[in-house]
Amino acid sequence: IGTSAVSIGEVATQWSRPNDFFERQVTSSLNFTSDSAVSVPDDDDLSMHNSPDIPFAVSFWINLSSTSGGTQTLLTKPGEYLVQVKNDDVEFTLFTNGSNHTKITAANSLTADWTSLVVTYDGTLDATASATPRKIYVNGAAASASVTTTGTYTGMANNSNDLIIGADDTSGTNNFNGLMADVVMITGSELSAAQALEFYQGGRSFDVTTHSRYSDVLAWWKMGDDQDLASGAGAVKDY
């Protein structure tokens, strides 16, 4: 979907290559602060509306500054989909519009430590409590989740909003406080439990080209690795 994203605000690159780098123990991440965000220009591939929806998944490595930090946005395409942390809960929301949306919540799932987080959606619309078209995996394990639906969800919108990582918008609304490493988006079908586990077992500097679903990777933002810069246009690259 392109080669770069724009880093907005005080996003600082935190990375190093210690002696055991080749054992994949690299501490690479972006340190988000109060006005930080990464903005990815709108692209049709980032919209998952397709009569009704396209299956997709997002994988993160995050390290919360605090599990009592309130509402913090990890990733959003405003008006289409949203992944947030609320204290130690994880929420994954899909929007038809502002009045019609469906959310799953994995309560009390996070700690203030490095955590592998995967959200995945199979593209079906059933938003009942007994259905599981959306799942949340924490450190490779499926989390128990509840469903909340407002109005009637009939499929995601397709708008021209940019995708934002680390906040609701480029002003830093509901900004994420902490460290964030690799962010990977996958389309084609939902991730299986085994495929979500691959991201956890691979660690936060995982070579995503070795993942079993690499052929379906839509975007891979390393968030501080390799050629990434601290700020400015093209700071965070899509590998």
Image (cartoon, grey):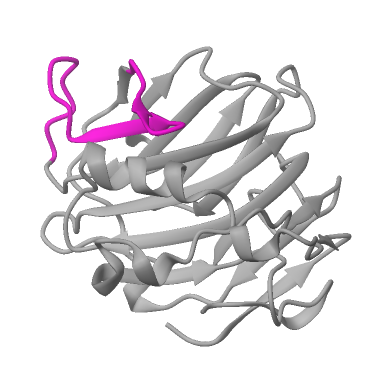
Q: Is residue 220 magenta?
A: no
The answer to whether residue 37 is left or right of residue 110 is: right
Q: Which residue is more in the foreground, 169 or 22?
A: 22
134 inside magenta stretch = yes
Q: Which image quadrant: the N terminus?
A: bottom left
- The quadrant holding residue 122 is top left
Is 67 or 206 nearer to us in this picture? 206
Give residue 222's position: percent from left, percent from top: 60, 66
- Can residue 81 be seen here? The reply is no
Residue range corresponding to the magenta coloring: 125-145
Is the magenta region chiefly helix, strand or loop?
A: loop
Residue 77 vertical placement versus 7 (above, below):
above
Q: Is residue 235 above or below residue 142?
A: below
The residue shown at (69%, 37%) is 63
Q: Is residue 106 left or right of residue 164?
A: left
Picture residue at 85% right of the left edge, 47% below the top:
33
Residue 48 position in % (x across, y down): 27, 61
